[in-house]
Amino acid sequence: LSWEFAYQSRFVVPDAIVCTFAALTLWLALSYVRNPNRPSFLRAAAICAAITFSTKVTCVFIILPVLVAACVHREPGTPFPRRAVWRLLGLFMASYLVLNPGIILQFPWFAQDAMDCFCTYSVWGLEGNTVNRGLDALGRIMVYLGGALFSPYVPIALALFALAIVGAWAMLRESRSTAFVLLVFPVAHVAFFAIQTAIIVRNLLVVIPFLAILAARGAMSLRPLIGRFAHGLLVTGLLACMALNASWLVSCALSIARYSPEHTVQQALHYIAGHPGSQYFVSEEVRKTFANQSNPMPANITSAPEKADYVVFFKWEKFDLWTPALGPLLNVRWFGSGEVNLCYYPGWIEGHNILIMGSSQ
């Protein structure tokens, strides 16, 4: 029920498929932790990790849960399972090469593509997705994971992310081996992108299965700490959050199917008229469009930009590929089709949405 996952799954990029293979890899690795006498789980996990890596090359660290699972279950005093680790790495790389024979058969093309990808993320940056590596990049990643990934409603997203943090703490107390298997990939993946100069948020979707499990574990860990009545409220609250997310997904789907320029204009006019305490400055193009459908226009539309609290414009007038993708910090409300989160994809090719931004921005 994540809007981020839902609209990304319609793109031509493979991130939704990556999530599926990553979840399967995690399940196989955890199955070995619970059944250490079944090494076939580890071999299957290594192959599945190779499929995940083949689907998207930025997921190279997906092999880490498999290696950690091989290391955490050994008898006290026994040596580090070096041979087992090397065998799993060999199986991982062999499976990757079988799935991607072009690496060998067309190595110059592969090397050129790999270099272009490396330079885009680590050297050049990518238009409005360019960031400063380090704390700036890490901060933007955490804002996305905490404020947008689970829900388009920031309070719900924050609450579910907080449950994931509680779940991580609970798992570390309960079983460090299980916790390490579950946490090693999302931590490594986030750290990897924190040292890049470009962040496209769809690259972070692969951590959804891990965070979802942690959030569920966090909700379960609260059960013994609260009374029966409070537990009922918690369950009711979680169901309400899922219902709100589902309602948002349905409304976004309908906004695409029922899109029309006239309806978009009426939505914006209704919103402005419903907030008489704020002043809105509209662009010349928006003013012409409003004038064709509303006479008179709402009284709180001003022609003096210095007196306006908000600015109203068509997306194509101000947003392009170089507009910074600031996420919730962008503080944008838009009307029209809801196929993507424009706060993270301001350069989206469709430009007929009407946007409202704070005048200070």
Image (cartoon, grey):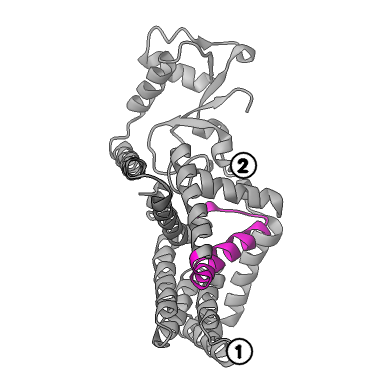
Position of residue 168 relative to residue 339, above or below, is: below
Q: Is residue 185 magenta?
A: yes
Near-viewer residue (284 or 197):
197
Which residue is at a point 46% across and 70% down the rendered structure image? Answer: 55
Name which residue type carries label 1.
Gly
The magenta stretch spans which residues? Answer: 174-202
Between discs 1 and 2, the one toward the N terminus: 1
Q: Which mark is residue 77?
A: 1
Give the class, few, some or many, for how many residues have Cα within 10 Å of label 2's Cα (few <14, many ≥20).
Answer: some
Name the residue beneath numbered marker 2: 324
Q: Which mark is residue 258?
A: none
Residue 86 rendering spot, x and y as whole percentages? 57, 89
Q: Is residue 250 left or right of residue 173?
A: left
Residue 319 lies in what quarter of the image?
A: top right
Position of residue 17 relative to residue 162, above or below, is: below
Q: Nearer the viewer, mark 1 or mark 2?
A: 1
Residue 3 rendering spot, x and y as whole percentages? 40, 46
- Report whether residue 132 is seen: no
Residue 235 rendering spot, x and y as whole percentages? 33, 45
Which residue is at a point 61% across and 47% down the rendered structure image? Answer: 140
Asked which secondary structure carries label 1, the reply is: loop
